[in-house]
Image (cartoon, grey):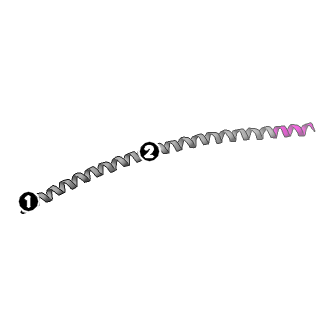
Amino acid sequence: MNRLADDYNVKLAATESHLAEARERRKYEEERSYEIMMAQEAISKKWKQEHTLTVQAYEEHLKKLRYENKHMKEKITELRG
């Protein structure tokens, strides 16, 4: 009977050890997942800012080109006239 109880206790200790290791791995992986999510959020924010700046630069350039085209059309009309 003592032998059976000892075997049970050994198996129980091994199972509890595996469970503790699994909990530690899960905790580490949850923390790592959170870090990755935060890094992705930071990258997304950076890309959104870069996109906004790119759009603003494009719109400014387009505005200048339209202004230049308007004056060139006026100049052509003036030279023809």
Residue at 7% in and 63% down: 80
Say whether residue 80 is magenta: no
Q: Quadrant of the N terminus?
A: top right
Q: State left or right for residue 57 relative to residue 30.
A: left
From the top left corner, tell me how far across and down residue 4 is, in percent: 89, 40
The quarter of the displayed image where residue 9 is located: top right
Disc 2 packing (10 Å; few <14; some 14–19; many ≥20): few
Magenta residues? 1-11
From the top left corner, tell me how far across and down residue 53 is, in percent: 34, 46
Residue at 81% in and 40% down: 12
Secondary element type, mark 2: helix
Say whether residue 8 is magenta: yes
Q: Amino acid at mark 1?
A: Glu
Residue in the foreground of this view, choosing between 34 and 55: 55
Residue at 69% in and 42% down: 22
From the top left corner, tell me how far across and down residue 34 is, in percent: 56, 42
The quarter of the displayed image where residue 81 is located: bottom left
Q: Amino acid at mark 2?
A: Lys
First of labels 2, 1 by sequence position:
2
Residue with the mark numbered 2:
45
**What distance separates the C-alpha of mark 2 from that of mark 1?**
49 Å
Magenta span: predominant SS is: helix
Residue with the mark numbered 1:
78
Please name which of the two marks, 2 or 1, marks the residue nearer to the observer: 1
